[in-house]
Image: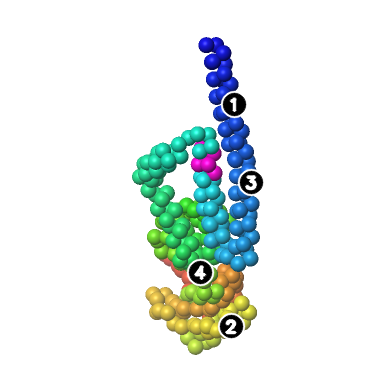
């Protein structure tokens, strides 16, 4: 009886020991193969000049799928019934899916962003109340770099279902500015001064042509709408330079910019 137990123990130890060794080998070799496949996929997409955001998304998704297949192969080698495991996994996946509907929505949103491509890495966008440059489009979230160099993470579900303003797509932007001058100022002269300010700026485009028009007759000023066009990357340079140069040009031309005055009233004794 004792010898039978020993023989049985040796048999099981040998059998399962070999399975464990085989599983380890499958893990090591499989991980190496996955790494090589992902590397080859990256090189293939780089040669075909795939969009950077699409490239990262596909590589991440492919990596997850291959790892799941590798784990199933290891479990099968260890003697785990993979059909039963798949059924359990499907049931667990359903339960997890019900609990994580938001995450699944974010995944679906990421797929939609890849298919329709409303944005890509490097675009300046406004979405979900945030403005920033697209840094990375991941499976569940999209990362932006805000104008003050802060990282902004937006769920893909909300991003794909909401409004997206892409400032980069067209390559040019219109700078909308309003300047007010006193009612005593000559309208024609003021328009000439404002137009000269924007046309003298080399970053302002000739086409579309810049415009200067009377916007409104306000309570204490005549307001002019100044609309220069520029390349997207020059937007803030044109904005700040126009603000500064306009103040100097109006002062030099003797055109008053209205501002509140305090009047002191002296009571006689």
- Tell me if residue 213 is in the magenta stretch: no
Which of the two marks, 4 or 2, is nearer to us in this view? 4
**256 and 205: which one is in front?**
205
Q: Is residue 40 left or right of residue 256?
A: right
Q: What is the magenta segment's predominant secondary structure?
A: helix
Residue named by callout 2: 199
- The residue at which mark 3 appears reads as 32
Q: Is residue 4 above or below residue 25?
A: above
Q: Residue at the spot x=46%, y=83% of the render?
A: 213
Spot the residue most to the top.
2
The residue carrying pointer 1 sits among few (fewer than 14), some (14 to 19) or many (20 or more) residues within 10 Å by Cα, namely few
Q: Which residues are magenta?
A: 70-75
Residue that appears at 61% across and 53% down? 37
Estimate the x, y position of residue 52 in percent, counting from the top left.
58, 62
Q: Circle 1 is placed at which residue position?
A: 14
Mark 2 vs mark 3, foreground winner is 3
Q: Choose between 131 and 153: the one closer to the eye.
A: 153
The answer to which of marks 2 and 3 sits earlier in the sequence is 3
Q: What residue is shown with label 4?
A: 167
Q: Of callouts 1 and 4, which one flags the residue occurring earlier in the amino acid sequence?
A: 1
* Separation (CA) of disc 3 from disc 1: 27 Å
Q: Are marks 4 and 3 in contact (CB under 8 Å)?
A: no
- The kind of secondary structure element at disc 1 is helix
- Give the Cα distance between marks 2 and 3: 61 Å
**If the image is split into quadrants, where does the C terminus sit?**
bottom left
Q: Residue at the location (53% across, 42% down)?
A: 73
Q: Is label 3 in contact with label 1 (beta carbons under 8 Å)?
A: no
**Front position among marks 4 and 3:** 3
Q: Position of residue 218 (x, y in %)?
A: 40, 76
Is any part of residue 252 visible from this angle?
Answer: no
């Amino acid at each position: 009886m004792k010898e039978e137990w020993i023989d049985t123990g040796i048999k099981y130890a040998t059998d399962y020991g070999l399975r464990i060794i085989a599983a380890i080998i499958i893990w090591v070799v499989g991980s190496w193969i996955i790494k090589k496949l992902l590397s080859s996929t990256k090189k293939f997409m780089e040669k075909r000049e795939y969009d950077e955001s699409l490239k990262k998304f596909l590589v991440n998704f492919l990596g997850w799928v291959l790892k799941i297949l590798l784990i199933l192969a290891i479990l099968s080698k260890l003697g785990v019934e993979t059909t039963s495991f798949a059924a359990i996994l499907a049931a667990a996946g359903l339960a997890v899916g019900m609990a994580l509907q938001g995450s699944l929505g974010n995944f679906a949103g990421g797929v939609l962003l890849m298919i329709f491509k409303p944005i890509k890495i490097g675009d300046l966008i406004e979405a979900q109340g945030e403005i920033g440059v697209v840094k990375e489009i991941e499976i569940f979230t999209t990362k932006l770099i805000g104008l003050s160099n802060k990282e902004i993470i937006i769920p893909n579900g909300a991003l794909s279902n909401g409004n997206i303003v892409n400032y980069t797509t067209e390559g040019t932007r219109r700078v909308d500015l309003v300047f007010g001058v006193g009612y005593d100022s000559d309208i024609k002269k003021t328009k000439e001064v404002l137009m000269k300010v924007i046309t003298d700026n080399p970053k302002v485009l000739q086409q579309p042509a810049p415009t200067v028009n009377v916007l409104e007759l306000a309570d204490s000023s005549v307001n002019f709408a100044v609309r220069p066009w520029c390349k997207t990357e020059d937007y803030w340079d044109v904005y700040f330079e126009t603000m500064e140069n306009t103040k100097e040009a109006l002062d030099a031309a003797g055109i008053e910019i209205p501002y509140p005055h305090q009047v002191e009233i002296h009571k006689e004794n």
